Image (cartoon, rainbow, N blue to C red):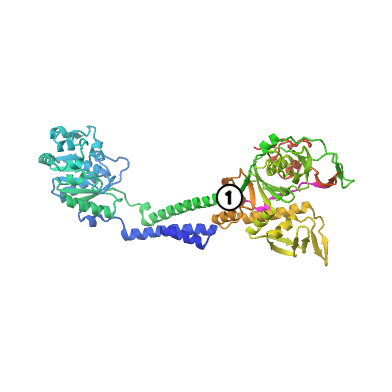
Amino acid sequence: MAGVVVFVLGLVAWDTNKGVLTSAIVAASVTGIVWLIWWSVSGPPDFARLLGVPRLGSIPDDSASPAPTIVEPDSETSNAYRATLEELEAHTSGQVLLVSSPGPGEGASTVALNLAIAATQRGRRVALIDGDVTGHGVSQFLSTGTEPGLTDLADGSATLADAARMWEIGPDSALPIVPSGSTETAPETLLDDPELAASIDRIAERADTVLIDAPPVAWDGATAPLAAHADGTILVVTDSATDAMVVDTRDRLVAAGAPVIGYVENRTKPPSFWRLPVVRMAKRAAGAFVAIALVYAGFTGLNLYGSWSSVDRQAFDTSEASAALPSTSVPPVADIIEDDPEAPPLEEVVVAAPTIEGAYRSFLLIGGDEAADLADVVLLTVLPADEDLAPFMVSLPRDLYVPNRCTNGFSRINATYRGCGDTNAATMLALTVEDFTGIKVDNFAIFTFDGFSEVIDGVGGIEICTEYPMRDKKSFLDIPGGCINADGATALAWVRSRHTQQFVDGKWRSVPGASDLTRNQHQQDVLIQLAKKLRDFDSPSDLAAKIEDLSNAFTVDDGLGISDAVSLAWSLRDVDVATINRLVVPVRLARTKAGQSILRAVVPFDEVLADFYPSLLEDDGGAADSSAAATPNRS
């Protein structure tokens, strides 16, 4: 309990990843120290002090053979029983003795049987009576059955001659045993019967000592009636017995008329390194640490699951959509006007469909423009399974001219972010990305403009550095020169800016080369910074809180479960974002005869991919006919 309190207080004071670990270590240490203090004060039970009687012997733990062990000619356990017998004979003159224990499982029956065997081997006249009618006494070691026996003597249904057995110990010795008998009648109503007392007296007339194997004192009502026939009790205890149990047992036996005359410590273990108090303290501390870690992990997992469950989801299955929609085999485009008449002619739109051989995981980030019902950001990130291959990302310009399965013609890629029959907008766009890149999209996330701003604000902003002041009236961009920590609105304006101006030499001038490709660069810069922020969460509880706070800011596919999300987040923690390759699709500006500005791919995407990741492609490069896209293949 003290450890739990310390752990909770530690989390309140320092709710970080290091704080969680430190709190768990401190809490586990406190648990171990508290146990050591308690053990130092209470220590192991002092049976001699509690009972006020001598210790008769100490029987070592022998897990190889529970009973009997005395039949072995010479062993540590056999010698211990013989020594215990000598102490018993030296400290008592009683003839009828109970052998019992405070609780079950402490080995009283084993001790009773082996003391009787030891005495028989020494030539003593000993009789052994099984007083445990539950079937857990010495009768369980016999092959002669339990009936007739003690209870049958008590109710007069059997004579002593009928009930007694002779158990052969050796060639020249046998041990008289009376089994427990039938259990049809409650034993406590029989065992104090005068007829049973007379039978025990007759047994005692023929024996030097009568040992009665009695049930645990506090667990069975038969012990007290049996005590009425005994002169005293040999109490068998183990280190599992508590002070309270031992004292209660002592008082019960005194009240029953068979006080404890001596005790036997059973299953004792020799001193060892692992039983040293400090070592035991360390083991308890380690156990506490594991328990705290498991409970905390379970609690945090439930929080994460609850937070993740609140995120909006959309159905996603590009394989089903691909089967339902026409293929991308469309005629060459004839309505394109090249902006540069000197450029080499492209007779048709370049479309790639490489066959990917290597295993990977891909994630499509979609920035949705709700007002225009178009995709403003199309960013694909791929994590190869091969640890020797760096992750890569590629931004597909929103004006990229590609085949559109829904219209069976061509359109800008951002226009495919619309539903087509039973296929929703995100699945339609993902399928288009697959057709163009040949890379199967595993999962997607959708951000609206407001959602993007909310996520940036949720992680505390991102850094934007420029040499000069920048502005874009259309995207509402207005930032000073140098580095700033941009909030969500500013970051959104930065990634959307297409008509960027910079203030140079006292005048606002257009930024050279500002275009969709510049926007793509800005989007990737922001995504990398966002990945850094999200992967460096302070603690699991902080991550759960962030997900819950931002749950309305994005939408994910229905196949991205909590375990997948955690696995993806964990894999990103090991990625050095500086090593992420940024692939660029070579394009050139053109327009349709209708006057729509478009970007045409100059080379197939598999050629772009092959420059960085030749091992992900087939030996022949995986190229397909430029007018048709083959089905992507995952391995």
- Asked whether, in this view, residue 194 is left or right of residue 110, the answer is left
User: Where 50 falls versus 427 (above or below)?
Assistant: below
Nearer to the camera, 541 or 52:
541
Q: Quadrant of the N terminus?
A: bottom left
10 Å crowding of disc 1: few (<14), some (14-19), many (20+): some
User: Where 397 falls versus 133 (above or below)?
Assistant: below
State the SS at label 1.
Answer: loop
Residue 276 sits in which quadrant? Answer: bottom left
Q: Which residues are magenta?
A: 573-588
| Residue corresponding to mark 1 | 310
Label total for image = 1
Q: Amino acid at mark 1?
A: Ser
Q: Position of residue 481 (x, y in %)?
A: 75, 65
Residue 158 sits in which quadrant? Answer: top left
- Asked whether, in this view, residue 339 is left or right of residue 395, the answer is right
Residue 384 visible in the current orientation: yes
Q: Position of residue 383 (x, y in %)?
A: 65, 46
Residue 478 sits in which quadrant? Answer: bottom right
Q: Position of residue 217 (x, y in %)?
A: 23, 47
Say whether residue 176 is magenta. no
User: Where 324 falls versus 397 (above or below)?
Assistant: above
Q: Quadrant of the C terminus?
A: top right
Q: Position of residue 322 (x, y in %)?
A: 69, 36
Nearer to the camera, 338 or 388:
338
Say whether residue 580 is magenta. yes
- Asked whether, in this view, residue 344 is left or right of residue 181, the answer is right
